[in-house]
Image (tube, helix red, strand yellow):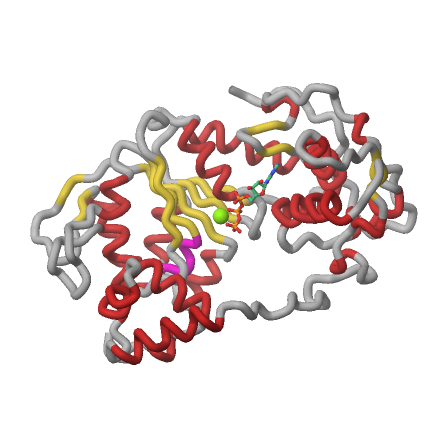
Amino acid sequence: MKNSSTPRSPRSRSKGTSSPPALPTSVASLPAKPSESPSDGVFFGMWTADAGMQRVFQIVQKAAQSDVSVLLRGETGTGKELLAKALHDLSPRKGGPFHAISCAALPASLLESELFGHVRGSFTGAVRDNPGHFRLAAGGTLFLDEVAEMPLDVQAKLLRVLETHTVIPVGGRESIRVDVRIVAATHKALRAEVEAGRFRADLMYRLRVVPIFIPALRERGGDVIRLAQRFIRELNGRSSRRIERIATAAARRLTEHDWPGNVRELRNVIEYAFVIGEGPVLGLADLPPELHEARPSRGARALPPPPDPREGQAARIRQALEQTGGHPGDAAQLLGISRVTLWRQIQRLGLQAYLRRSR
Ligand SMILES: Nc1ncnc2c1ncn2[C@@H]1O[C@H](COP(=O)(O)OP(=O)(O)OP(=O)(O)O)[C@@H](O)[C@H]1O
Ligand SMILES: [Mg+2]
């Protein structure tokens, strides 16, 4: 199980040094056939040559053997969900279900019924029993994504469930035994959330028995070009363009970029190059606008243009909420969508002001 061999590429070089290192820009410099073993830096669809990231893979392999709660902390696009799935697939629970739920963007009442279930008739719109994610994940793994966003009253209920290994569905009386392994993820420092009074300390200790910190892509500079090459090779097989090499100037720009969206952003950048550029060399002109700004920094980056084509949808939801006195259950019924979908859309479109106040 142990990842014994060291990766080919050295520990990431820090960016911004005065003499940039030579960059392995030829796609052919990668081994002809990618091997899918941890010793080649590949782990459940993730690749790295960075020592810190390899260490993460090793900890995941070890933690998977036990049933303890794991907390994954990392920025967006660093692979938290992929690692959560790896934890499940490597664990003795791999034959059981893997369920993921995002704790962000749902109000307490709805999140509670999504997690613990509800019985029919327990609130307007509860037209049938809902087992909830804890019961759906029985015998397997429950992935609590964006756990720092969980409202405090749901945190208290979650703690009780973790302590008693039982759930009581909303509107129900009986407690039901559940056997679930918890993996949680956040991009925030839970300790700071605890200090700010937004997260329960006792729950934090329950969730972070094994905390795993995933390094950001900018901290593993050696990975940027190698990952770009891997994405290029993958897309070469699927696209009419064939890229054989990354021009030195483009490679330098890629290594200098701050990568706030991490590996997901890098992949998108390469896909952009396939769509926009031509010929066998990926040049500077093939990179999206945000990479052309001189040494972009996180704070200085221009925001993307505001989304616009949603006005029609927003108007429909606004109207439904107005007609139902801001009642989300009734509005969801009127619109013919689930309460969860409606809540997501309300959050996305910023329509919270149209909700009934007394909840
Ligand atoms: N090391 C890696 N190697 C290859 N691909 C990766 C790696 N890390 C992440 N990815 C890619 O980035 C995408 C994002 O990964 P994932 O959804 O697990 O990130 P996340 O941390 O959960 O992000 P978010 O916080 O935005 O939900 C994946 O679909 C995968 O394509
Ligand atoms: Mg995720």
Q: Position of residue 107 (x, y in %)?
A: 32, 65
Q: Residue furthest left?
A: 173
Residue situated in front as seen by the camera: 88 or 195: 88
Q: Is residue 24 left or right of residue 54?
A: right
As drawn, is 34 to the left or to the right of 358?
right
- Name the residue: 46% across, 57% down: 191
The residue drawn where x is 84% and y is 50% is 284
Residue 236: horizontal and vertical position, in percent? 72, 32
Residue 261 colored magenta? no
269 vs 41: above or below: below
Depth check: give the residue in front, 217 or 171.
Answer: 171
The answer to which quarter of the image holds residue 54 is top right
Q: Where are the magenta residues, as a range?
A: 146-151
Name the foreground residue: 113 vs 341. Answer: 341
Q: Which of the image's four quarters has the C terminus?
A: bottom left
Along the viewing direction, whichever of 294 and 20 lies nearer the viewer: 294
Quadrant for ligand 1 reads top right
- Residue 312 in picture, x, y percent from top left: 45, 71
190, above or below 213, in the image: below
